[in-house]
Image: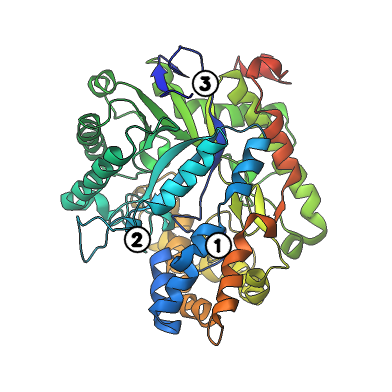
């Protein structure tokens, strides 16, 4: 019989006070679809609208949800069994508010809003896996990225109090529905906020804390820092003293794990120092106050034979090296973590949809072009199109005084990132949305079903070296022998 988990000092413990270190992955691309995970351009709302227009609402819903096609295929009992077989014990579940509420009918809970969450939470519980519920997309977008499903580059969630009120309304319903479920480790109320003034985020968290605690005093709250879960410096001691049973979420992506890195990672002393410093900087404010830290997202992306060719293995050796050295740090600090991510079409997932499936076969040429055009922001290799956008970058540098070039969320978005995000990942991607939907034309219901079920576990390949590393590190930290603990402790 399981018990509610709770925060005790810097640790997560069960009802007997025994430490529980949560190790797992994020179920991204499921109840909050993302372009690089599922292979579409732009945002989820755009492809849903385009597909309904192209093949009709009934056929569109048949792919996404009717008879639970895509949403059922994406995670089933076989997925939970595989996950548990690696010794992992927690799955973070990102979801989009659209599953519970319609923008044209706000504050009216959809009849079937809970059915997908309930099914997967129960599947995980049956295998002894905790879940963490993560609101990944809030009304108008709580951050400036595609994964908040707002289609722009402004986090307008912070400019409309009513949208904040709607998110609190949703969490009140979630708390009522799940307050007695002990297999839910806790609630992650807002993924990666980017709130320019900082104070509005903390005030929102305080209102949210009060609203949830009136209903549910048991579940842990996992609160992301500002600027993509990296900045806690404006949270204020008066708030963290009040917020009981709360853990604080960092997202610890390393630049060494992405194509944009300027150097190959070999685990040199200098590189390990950079890796360690970046991680420790994210948690420094929290550590000074003795607060509980959860690493809600991290992990490299991987090369693919169809794009990187003969260099694939060498690149992935380096990326796995980054991952293992990050795990050393997390084991040193006995930190709970959730790697990004469990399943996709071959870029980052622990398992990924086979190239031989109907979905990847149908979209092969489209995916190749999408990769070449670098229209997905996440981990993009823009080498083939960089020269197209560089003149615009140069033009801005020439015409705008340097003191005005760093706009929030700098330094995460530098000038080049801002230009390419607006021009490539938003504008060019928009022109590809209808083309993606047109692939469904003339397909029968059986064809559409086959596309959806391409995402089922039996149609997926496994990223074995990643999974072996995760399995090894699912053991207790004291059983592991880090190779550079002595060096890193002094950094």
Question: x, y (%) of residue 132?
Answer: 44, 37
Residue plotted at (70% across, 43% down): 319
**Residue under circle 1?**
38
The one nearer the camera, 460 or 225, is 460
- The crowd level at tag 1 (other Cα within 10 Å; few <14, some 14-19, many 20+) is many
SS at badge 2: loop
Residue plotted at (22% across, 20% down): 238
For residue 378, which quarter of the picture? Answer: bottom right
SS at badge 1: helix
Q: Which numbered tag is attached to residue 150?
A: 2
Residue plotted at (24% across, 24% down): 239
Question: x, y (%) of residue 439?
Answer: 56, 81
Q: Which numbered tag is attached to residue 50?
A: none
Q: From what the image shows, is residue 82 above or below residue 368?
A: above
Mark 1 or mark 3: whose residue is earlier in sequence: 3
Q: From what the image shows, is residue 472 above or below residue 440?
A: above
Left or right: 109, with 249 as reference point: left
Extreme residue in the bottom direction: 442
**Residue under circle 3?**
20
Mark 2 or mark 3: whose residue is earlier in sequence: 3
The C terminus lies in quadrant:
top right
CA–CA distance between discs 1 and 2? 17 Å
Q: From what the image shows, is residue 252 above or below residue 456?
A: above
CA–CA distance between discs 1 and 3? 33 Å
Left or right: 299, with 7 as reference point: right
For residue 110, which quarter of the picture? Answer: bottom left
CA–CA distance between discs 2 and 3? 36 Å
Extreme residue in the front direction: 1
């Amino acid at each position: 019989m399981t018990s509610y988990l709770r925060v005790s000092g810097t640790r997560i413990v069960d009802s007997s006070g025994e430490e529980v270190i949560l190790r797992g992955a994020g179920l991204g691309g499921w109840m909050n679809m993302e372009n690089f995970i599922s292979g579409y351009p732009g945002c989820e709302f755009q492809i849903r609208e385009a597909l309904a227009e192209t093949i009709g609402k009934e056929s569109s819903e048949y792919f996404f949800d009717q008879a639970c096609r895509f949403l059922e295929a994406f995670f089933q009992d076989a997925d939970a069994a595989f996950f548990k077989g690696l010794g992992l014990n927690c799955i973070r579940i990102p979801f989009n508010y659209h599953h519970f509420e319609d923008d044209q009918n706000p504050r009216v809970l959809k009849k079937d809003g809970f059915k997908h969450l309930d099914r997967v939470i129960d599947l995980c519980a049956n295998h002894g896996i905790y879940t963490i519920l993560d609101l990944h997309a809030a009304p108008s977008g709580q951050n400036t990225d595609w994964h908040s499903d707002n289609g722009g580059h402004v986090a307008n969630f912070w400019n409309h109090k009513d949208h904040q009120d709607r998110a609190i309304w949703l969490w009140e319903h979630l708390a009522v529905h799940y307050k007695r479920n002990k297999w839910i480790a806790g609630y992650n109320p807002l993924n990666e906020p980017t709130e320019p003034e900082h104070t509005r985020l903390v005030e929102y968290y305080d209102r949210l804390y009060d609203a949830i605690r009136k209903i549910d005093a048991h579940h842990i709250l996992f609160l992301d820092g500002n600027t993509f879960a990296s900045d806690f410096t404006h949270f204020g001691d008066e708030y963290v003293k009040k917020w009981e049973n709360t853990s604080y979420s960092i997202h610890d992506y390393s630049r060494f794990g992405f194509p944009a890195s300027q150097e190959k990672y070999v685990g040199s002393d200098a590189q390990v120092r950079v890796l360690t410093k970046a991680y420790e900087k994210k948690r420094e404010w929290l550590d000074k106050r003795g607060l509980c830290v959860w690493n809600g997202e991290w992990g490299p992306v991987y090369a693919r034979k169809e794009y990187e060719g003969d260099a694939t293995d060498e690149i992935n050796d380096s990326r796995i090296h980054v991952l293992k050295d990050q795990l050393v740090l997390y084991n040193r600090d006995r930190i709970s973590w959730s790697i990004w991510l469990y399943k996709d079409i071959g870029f980052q997932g622990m398992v990924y949809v086979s190239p031989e499936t109907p979905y990847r076969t149908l979209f092969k040429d489209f995916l190749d072009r999408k990769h070449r055009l670098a229209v997905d922001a996440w981990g993009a290799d823009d080498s083939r199109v960089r020269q197209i956008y560089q003149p615009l970058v140069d033009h801005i540098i020439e015409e705008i005084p340097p003191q005005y070039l760093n706009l929030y969320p700098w330094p995460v978005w530098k000038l080049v990132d801002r230009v390419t995000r607006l021009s490539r990942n938003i504008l060019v991607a928009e022109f590809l949305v209808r083309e993606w939907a047109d692939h469904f034309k003339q397909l029968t219901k059986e064809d559409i079903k086959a596309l959806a079920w391409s995402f089922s576990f039996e149609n997926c390949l496994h990223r074995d070296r990643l999974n072996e590393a995760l399995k090894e590190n699912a053991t207790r930290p004291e059983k592991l022998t880090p190779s550079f603990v002595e060096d890193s402790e002094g950094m």
